[in-house]
Amino acid sequence: MTYKEQLDYSRIPQHIAIIMDGNGRWAKNKGKRRGEGHIAGASALHDTMMNASKLGVKYVTVYAFSTENWTRPDEEVNGLMALLFEKLDLGIFMDNDIRFCVIGDTDRLPEKVRERMNKCIDLSANNKRGTLTVALSYSSKWEITRAAKCIALKVQQGELDVNAITDQTIDEHLCTSFMPDPDLLIRTGGETRMSNYLLWQCAYTELYFCDTYWPDFDEEALCKAIYTFQQRERRFGKTSEQVAEENDNK
Ligand code: FPP
């Protein structure tokens, strides 16, 4: 039986975050340039967004370009920016009722990418079927530092009482304030680290690592990740007995 056939459709994760790793190695294995790996990666992203949406996943948040990725060779950075510009297709979002969002330090992106990106964000804002968020020029440490500065300024200006700061205050000052925390984080490409991605938001997220290079991540690979997620017990710090009792009372 396939993983797709084994899924419990009443327990599909609401939000999946993805670290799309392995484009470069995928290309190298095929004797291609790294840029061709990113082109294949963009195609895998399109397919994954469609597959996730069909399965009922409401939010998909992908790590496309980290703050640290600016230090890659100019040729690769410019190629990624050009690819982003080319692939930002409003029609795909409108035809599929997908809302497009971006998180990150977008002021650093080339102007023409920002313009096209903002157009997609604005015009898809009322789409309801799902939300694709792309993390661009993003890192958790950048995001948390920015939130801390903003909160400190509000305290300094008397708009916020320091004793009123809770974890919800932090949530509200992060770029991700409009989305629920991820239920499942998938990292492809064989590495088992978070790489400065959604560190605050993944406090209770189930982590799933697979060796598949991102361009090869297909529908069955996605279903395997979701199936694995469904075999886990999420306790959020409680005991198994408490969780079972809560489920009985639902
Ligand atoms: C990591 O693989 C991947 C990236 C740094 C870029 C991811 C970008 C895409 C999938 C294209 C996105 C396109 C759009 C339209 C958002 P790597 O290069 O680090 O691979 P490696 O670890 O094998 O070298």
Image (cartoon, rainbow, N blue to C red):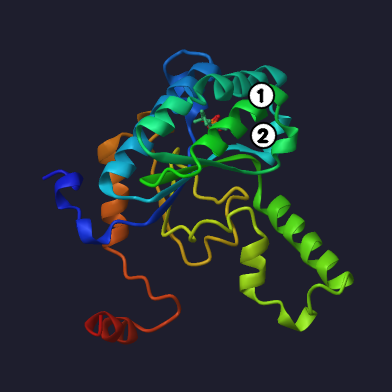
Instruction: Judge the density around disc 2: few (<14), some (14-19), many (≥20) Cα neighbours within 10 Å.
Output: some
Q: Quadrant of the C terminus?
A: bottom left
Instruction: Judge the density around disc 1: few (<14), some (14-19), many (≥20) Cα neighbours within 10 Å.
Output: some
Q: Is residue 159 visible?
A: yes
Question: Of 138 and 100, which appears nearest the observer?
Answer: 100
Left or right of 154 on screen, residue 239: left
Task: Please name the amino acid that badge 1 sits on.
Answer: Val
- Distance between the alpha carbons at the discs numbered 1 and 2: 8 Å
- Residue at the extreme right of the image, as rendered: 156
Residue 142 percent location from the top left of the image: 72, 51
Q: Is residue 137 above or below residue 162?
A: above
Q: Residue at x 49, y 49 (%)?
A: 192
Residue 159 percent location from the top left of the image: 81, 72
Q: Is residue 116 above or below residue 180?
A: above
Question: Of 207 and 198, which appears nearest the observer?
Answer: 198
Q: Is residue 212 above or below residue 4?
A: above
Ligand 1 within 8 Å, label 2 CB: yes
Residue 154 percent location from the top left of the image: 82, 68
Residue 79 percent location from the top left of the image: 61, 18
Q: Residue at x 26, y 54 (%)?
A: 227
Left or right of 243 on screen, residue 156: right
Q: Secondary structure at mark 1?
A: helix
Query: What residue does disc 1 label?
Result: 77
User: Number of marks in the image?
Assistant: 2
Q: Is residue 45 visible?
A: no
Residues marked 1 and 2 touching at CB (< 8 Å): yes
Q: Quadrant of the N terminus?
A: top left
Task: Please name the amino acid that badge 2 sits on.
Answer: Asn
Q: Looking at the rendered structure, which numbered label has been put on residue 122? A: none
Q: Looking at the rendered structure, which numbered label has been put on residue 69? A: 2
Ligand 1 within 8 Å, label 1 CB: no
- Residue at the extreme left of the image, as rendered: 1
